[in-house]
Amino acid sequence: ALDDKAAAAPAAANGGADDAPAALELAKLFAVHMDALRAALAVFNARAGGDDAKKYEDTIRERTSEKLRVWIENNHARSRAACGEKLAALHEGSLAKRSGKDAASGAYTDVASIRFDVKTLATQYLVRAPGPARDAALPEYLQGPAADTYVWLFSRSEDEHEAKLGEM
């Protein structure tokens, strides 16, 4: 019963897909675990008896604690992957289009425009990002691809300035 509930919760959070369950917030994960543990212990206690019942109940608790630890690790890995994918998609849909060598006529020309787009991206990300890795992934993005956009603008400005000096 415990394994069935534990497997069903992440799958249900992802629309029933068993192969790629959505990451859960830790509070939700613990709530599902505790509900499943209570149900398993209720079934066990209804059928168990004798001197060994307490020993077996302890075994159930130990095994479910180990399953929870593994589930937390897997959940965090799913969350980290989903957050990375979400940030990459948002970046490609906004900042990447206006920076780099493929930037069209709408390329960034000032820091304020980049800052606005980074704030917008961060807001969209925080609304949509799943699971416990959500908050840790954003600073990594801000120090990586988002910072690279600023570097691109500064390099472009420097190149334009050097080209103007060369024309003199």
Image: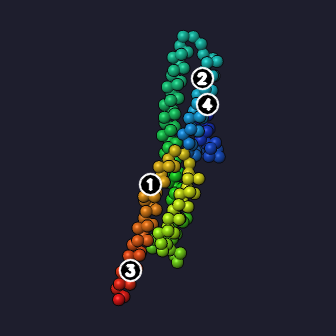
Q: Work out how far the residue at label 2 is from the one at label 1, CA to CA, in angstroms.
A: 42 Å
* The disc label shown at residue 35, or none: 4
Find residue 51 and report its image quarter: top right
Residue type at mark 2 is Leu
Q: In the rendered image, which residue does mark 2 sit on?
A: 41
Residue 120, percent from left and from top: 55, 61
Q: Is residue 117 above or below residue 51?
A: below
Pointer 4 local density, CA inside 10 Å: few below 14, some 14–19, many at least 20: some
Residue 57, percent from left and from top: 54, 20
Residue 157, percent from left and from top: 41, 75
Find residue 89 and report its image quarter: bottom right
Q: Earlier in the sequence, mark 2 or mark 4?
A: 4
Q: Work out how far the residue at label 3 is from the one at label 2, CA to CA, in angstroms.
A: 73 Å
Which residue reaches farthest bottom?
A: 168
* The disc label shown at residue 161, or none: 3
Q: Work out how far the residue at label 1 is from the one at label 3, CA to CA, in angstroms.
A: 31 Å
Q: Earlier in the sequence, mark 4 or mark 3?
A: 4
**Residue drawn 58% across the image and 28% down it:** 37
Q: Is residue 103 visible?
A: no
For marks 1 and 3, give the one nearer the viewer. Answer: 3
Q: In the rendered image, which residue does mark 1 sit on?
A: 140
Residue type at mark 3 is His
Q: Earlier in the sequence, mark 3 or mark 2?
A: 2
Query: Does dot 2 land on a helix, a strand or a loop?
Result: helix
Query: Does dot 3 land on a helix, a strand or a loop?
Result: helix
Q: Work out how far the residue at label 1 is from the one at label 4, CA to CA, in angstroms.
A: 35 Å
Asked if marks 4 and 3 touch (Cβ < 8 Å), the reply is no
**Residue drawn 51% across the image and 62% down it:** 118
For marks 3 and 2, give the one nearer the viewer. Answer: 3
